[in-house]
Image: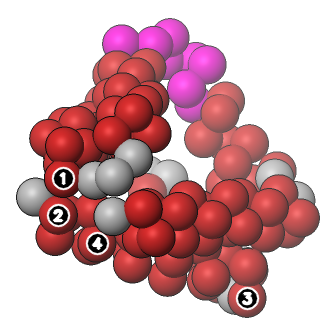
Amino acid sequence: MIWVLYGLAFFWIAAGTSFILYTEESRRFLENSMAKMNPKFLAFIPMIVGVLLILAARASGAFWFILILGLLAIGKGLYFLLGPRGQIKALFDWWFKSAQDRTYRFWGLIVVLLGMVILSWT
């Protein structure tokens, strides 16, 4: 399961770097690919990632960190699946339409750091 951690780490580093360097293009890509999807369908993506992280946590030197990331991802998926529809729609509208470029860059920095931490501790 170590390959799951390496794959997620490299993906997060690449995605975060694109958020930092190509902010407007990343925003458009996300908006075009995800904004029109049903949040209940999108809920399964973080839930699957969370389950993979929990299963791969034992292969890592940072078991608790990976386990907590997995539980947070499952929680996010459950929120998208079971949360109030209006609140989730407002969250998506804010992220795709109202969030500033600075917010996207900051999120990109966080994602790059998470990927680097997973890569270095694995």
Quadrant for the N terminus in the image: bottom left
**Secondary structure mostly taken by the magenta-highlighted segment of the chain:** helix
In this orientation, which residue lies closer to the viewer: 7 or 44?
7
Mark 1 or 4: in front is 1
Q: How many numbered discs sit on the rendered protein?
A: 4
Residue hosting label 4: 6
Q: Amino acid at mark 4?
A: Tyr
**Between marks 4 and 3, how big is the CA–CA gap?**
22 Å
Q: Amino acid at mark 3?
A: Leu
Q: Are marks 2 and 4 in contact (CB under 8 Å)?
A: yes
**Between marks 2 and 1, how big is the CA–CA gap?**
6 Å
Mark 3 or 2: in front is 2
Q: Of helix, strand and loop, which one carries label 1?
A: helix
Circle 1 residues within 10 Å: few <14, some 14–19, many ≥20? some
Q: Residue at x 82, y 50 (%)?
A: 98
Q: Which mark is residue 59?
A: 1
> Image height check: is 119 above or below 62?
below
Task: Please report the bounds of the magenta region as a residue range.
Answer: 82-89
Mark 3 or 1: in front is 1
Q: Residue at x 40, y 22 (%)?
A: 75
Residue hosting label 3: 21
> Which of the marked residues, 3 or 1, is nearer the chain's N terminus?
3
Q: Which mark is residue 104?
A: none
Where is residue 9 shown, x and y percent of the image? Answer: 39, 69
Q: Are marks 2 and 1 in contact (CB under 8 Å)?
A: yes
Q: Which mark is residue 2?
A: 2
**Between marks 3 and 1, how big is the CA–CA gap?**
32 Å
Q: Is residue 83 left or right of residue 106?
A: left
In this orientation, which residue lies closer to the viewer: 53 or 31?
53
